[in-house]
Amino acid sequence: MAASANQLRINLAINDTVHGLDIDPRTTLLDLLRETLDLTGTKKGCNHGQCGACTVHVNGQRVLSCLTLAALCDGVQVRTIEGIGTPDDLHPMQDAFIAHDGFQCGYCTSGQIMSALAVLEEPWGPDAAAIKEAMSGNICRCGAYPNIVAAVQEVRKGLEVDRNA
Amino acid sequence: MREFALIRAETADAAIAALTAHPNARLIAGGTNLVDLMKEGVETPTHLIDINGLGGLDDVQARGNGGLMIGALASNSAVAWHSDVQVRFPMMSEAILAGATTQLRNMATMGGNLLQKNRCFYYANHAARCNKRAPGSGCDAMDGVNRMCAVLGTSDHCIAAHPSDVCVALRALDAVVHVTGVNGHRAIDFADFHKRPGDTPHVEFELAHDELILGIEVPGLPFAANSTYLKLRDRTSYAFALVSIAAALKLEGDTVDDVRLAVGSVGTVPWRSADAEDAMRGAPATAETFAKAADIFFEGAIPRAGNGFKIELAKRAIVRVMETLKERAI
């Protein structure tokens, strides 16, 4: 993309680190993460809001970074897959996806996990049907859906135990 | 994506001034539809006016008369899960949750939902003719892939179906759209907000270039507590409707005392039939009454080669929804 005469400045926090950036207003949050900041854990699938691979959290809510203009993200808090766990210290949801084989090729996985974490904070019911509906914005071409639901349910039930302890 | 300049508006007056100064500017809030169409080159604004900084427009206020005032910047998710919406107007909550996905509903605003573009196969396809995208070019949907297209309110120039779910509920509920612009505030009946294509399919809304939506008023309607939204589609989740039904029912004994009925994805705008509702009021609450009303609803429908199935599908869906509401009302 050629440099734009319309460059503008944004400040935003990504995984608790504040960045001040001069951007072309056409830049999506997805391209900002991947191309500018080298945070390539967030994936570009369809780039049209239909697959969910680019799911991140903005101000605590899951959104599609491919349809989010970075120019509208001044002052927001972004959390990506890089901000929830590390290879040496995985998040319980990441552990659960491994335990339940919640992926094959892995391309949709970061988006699935960011969605799954949000589902646990949203007012969905506890049964598998509710989890499936809540996760319908994340497409998995390998068809790992039953295992993804199992992973989400394991973490959800673990949280219930914690809350009742 | 074409180049554009971003303008951040902190007040409605600033947004109106920016719209007035730039004839090819667009407002942006959630951007879920607009950004996608900008990527496709269907929308090519010179300026985007960011209205997310406008204060006081993102909440749902309960009105004393049983109604609601929904801010234009309230997210689809916030409205769908709002307890007053769920209790007073379940059809509205169900309609929102039947549309798109949580990620999109978290981003999308209520004002933007009213202004979303149709999903006709040819609209975002530059190789095709489309009178909405390129006025005067023609309509390839007429004799093309028109399975998803409308059978009511069509013209010789456009048969695109209105895509929204929640707008079907808002049509049934006689919502009012509050807007502001250079000439001040005005309130627009929901029935007048979306325009049928006629000879000008590209003119879609009762909204001037300098106007923006402030909120959506839903008048109190006690019997809407017994309402629902049924969406029939090609897959269980995350698909546009083939047909959808928003309805509310009030019984007096075994008789229909009052009723609201709107049908989605069959019209070029969210569709309602006063004659169909009148046929039910005062009549026995039976499948025969509901089926007769459904027939009246689709009088004058004009199917094309691919979408005639919608008429029978919608008629049966109307009967099923009214029977469901009847059981709940007893």
Image (cartoon, rainbow, N blue to C red):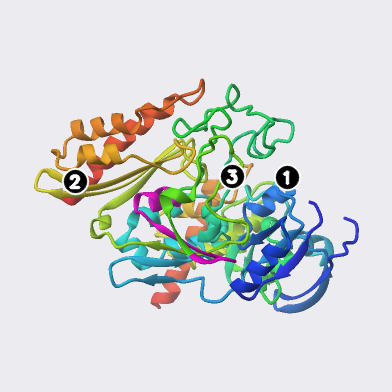
Q: Secondary structure at mark 1?
A: loop
The quadrant the N terminus of chain A occupies is: bottom right
Q: Position of residue A130 (x, y in %)?
A: 43, 54
In the image, residue B99 sits, relative to residue B107, either above or below, namely above
Q: Amino acid at mark 3?
A: Val
The Cα atoms of the two marked residues, 2 and 3, are separated by 42 Å
Q: Quadrant of residue B177?
A: bottom left
Among the two numbered marks 2 and 1 on one chain, the one whose residue lies closer to the N terminus? 1
Residue B310 left/right relative to A79: left
Q: Residue at x 29, y 73 (%)?
A: B64
Residue beneath label 1, please? B40
Q: Amino acid at mark 1?
A: Glu
In the image, residue B191 sits, relative to residue B12, either above or below, namely above
Q: Which mark is residue B327?
A: 2
The Cα atoms of the two marked residues, 1 and 3, are separated by 20 Å
Please give the chain letter of the residue carrying mark 3: B
Q: Residue at x 64, y 61 (%)?
A: B28
Q: Residue furthest left?
A: B253
Which range is magenta?
B166-185
Q: Residue at x 70, y 78 (%)?
A: A16
Q: Position of residue A50 (x, y in %)?
A: 62, 47
**Would residue B120 be seen by someone viewing this image from the given angle?**
yes
The Cα atoms of the two marked residues, 2 and 1, are separated by 47 Å
Q: Is residue B169 magenta?
A: yes
Q: Residue at x 90, y 57 (%)?
A: A2
